Amino acid sequence: MGIIEVRGKISEKIWGGRTPEEILSKRFKLFVLLAVLLSGLFWIYRAKVGVGFLPNFEWFIPTLVVVGSLSLPFEGKRFWRELNRHFGIVVLVSVIVFDTLLFGLRHMPIFLFRWSGFIFVWILAVRNRISVFEGYRTLLGSSIVTAAVAILLFDFWTGVIGCGLQWGFSAAFIGQIPFTFYHLTSLLFVPPLVGLGKMLVRVKVPALSSLRVGAKAKEVVS
């Protein structure tokens, strides 16, 4: 068996399928796996550069929102359906592990607000479920609005309520304002994430086409 043939079989195994539904399912699984990888890379990035470097510029919440908002039914094993459904819990575990290893338990009161804030973000994203087959602009607009609301709620919950309980609500609110403006720049990650999701689920499917009498039939794909 040649190298080209092996590559073709591997590509078919990962990327192809017997039916459009099977292909879509495989590719959306790949999208979820890439989102898991991006979430893990974010904590590696934070460990390398430190939390003081652009502290509120992150792709973590945008990834949670985009994966939570896009909806596509899975075929096959239950594992993939559960991973997509509970993606937020999977990445939350990575947050807890990272925070605990890097900072220990001395900031536990703040961490409890931080961790629960990510749960709120995931719930908000899931409630925004929208079909991945919608147009790019529709998906992008909905995802950006949801991500912006998620960032505002997350910052209010963690920065104003969480920190306010320790240092006073007035000081926490005033101090949080510039950080929230910085945080909203994270919306820059939404367009490429939505574009990646749309690109991965572009699958050619047979479509019926009306023909005039006497015309030759041909396959039409979209």
Image (cartoon, helix red, strand yellow):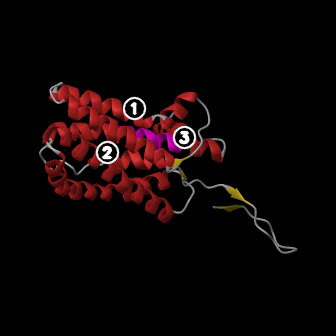
Of residues 79 and 118, the one nearer the viewer is 118
Q: Is residue 114 highlighted in magenta?
A: no
Q: Is residue 35 highlighted in magenta?
A: yes
Q: Count residues near mark 1 (Cα–Cα under 10 Å), then give few for <14, some for 14-19, many for 20+.
A: some
Which residue was labeled with disc 2? 60
Q: Which residue shows up at 53% across the image and 63% down it?
A: 135
Q: Secondary structure at mark 1?
A: helix
> Which x, y percent locates residue 193?
39, 53
Q: Amino acid at mark 1?
A: Val
Q: Does 34 sit above or below residue 104?
A: below
> How many numbered circles does the render carry?
3
Q: Amino acid at mark 2?
A: Phe
Q: Which sits earlier in the primary sequence, circle 1 or circle 3?
A: 3
Which residue was labeled with disc 1? 90
* Residue 26 - label: 3
Q: Count residues near mark 3 (Cα–Cα under 10 Å), then give few for <14, some for 14-19, many for 20+.
A: many
Q: Secondary structure at mark 2?
A: helix
> Which x, y percent locates residue 101?
20, 26
